[in-house]
Image (tube, grey):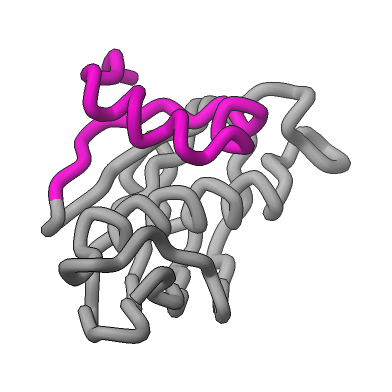
């Protein structure tokens, strides 16, 4: 996993829960946000499987940062108002990486699609979330 840039650290600092999850920023632009979480036994369920909540939390974090980077003028922030996750495989080692891209950037909502892959590049989950635009 790569080290976070100053911008990446600043963006993650806006989401304190990301530190609890062990999220590490890879890249963050309005077009694409990438971050990773390493597999660790403390983040697992039975049989050493990375907990689904960790995967969902990672995708929610990258999705929120994607929405934040795409906020319209005059907006102060975002909040997740809907999220749908499909899981495809278990993760028992390595790390997971979420890649989030905006699907719709509007004045009151932003819809973000996040794909989560394991360290071998296999799809682990797909998340679609809607973020409310705040402060307009």
In the drawing, does residue 44 fall left or right of residue 104? right
Residue occupying image coordinates x 34% and y 76%: 136
5 in the magenta segment: yes
Residue 111: name its quadrant. Answer: bottom left
Residue toward you, 86 or 25? 25
Residue occupying image coordinates x 29% and y 14%: 3
Rendered location of residue 47, percent (x, y): 83, 38
Q: Is residue 43 above or below residue 103?
A: above
Residue farthest to the top, as pictured? 3
How many numbered dots are placed on residues in this image? Answer: 0
In the drawing, does residue 73 fall left or right of residue 85? left
Residue toward you, 50 or 108? 108
Residue occupying image coordinates x 47% and y 55%: 59
Rendered location of residue 63, percent (x, y): 39, 59
Residue 81: name its quadrant. Answer: bottom right
Residue occupying image coordinates x 24% and y 65%: 71
Residue toward you, 107 or 21? 107
Q: Is residue 127 above or below residue 7?
A: below
| First to last magenta residue range | 1-29
In the drawing, does residue 101 fall left or right of residue 62? left
26 in the magenta segment: yes
Residue toward you, 25 or 93? 25
């Amino acid at each position: 996993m790569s080290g976070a840039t100053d911008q990446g650290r600043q963006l993650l600092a806006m989401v304190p829960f990301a530190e609890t999850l062990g999220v590490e920023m890879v890249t963050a632009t309005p077009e694409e946000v990438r971050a990773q979480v390493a597999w660790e036994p403390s983040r697992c369920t039975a049989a050493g499987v990375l907990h689904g909540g960790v995967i969902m939390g990672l995708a929610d974090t990258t999705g929120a940062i994607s929405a934040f980077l795409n906020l319209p003028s005059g907006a102060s922030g975002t909040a997740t108002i809907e999220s749908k996750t499909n899981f495809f495989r278990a993760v028992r080692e390595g790390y997971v990486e979420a890649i989030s891209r905006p699907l719709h950037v509007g004045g009151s909502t932003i819809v973000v699609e996040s794909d989560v892959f394991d360290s071998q590049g296999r799809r682990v989950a797909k998340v679609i979330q809607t973020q409310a635009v705040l402060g307009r």
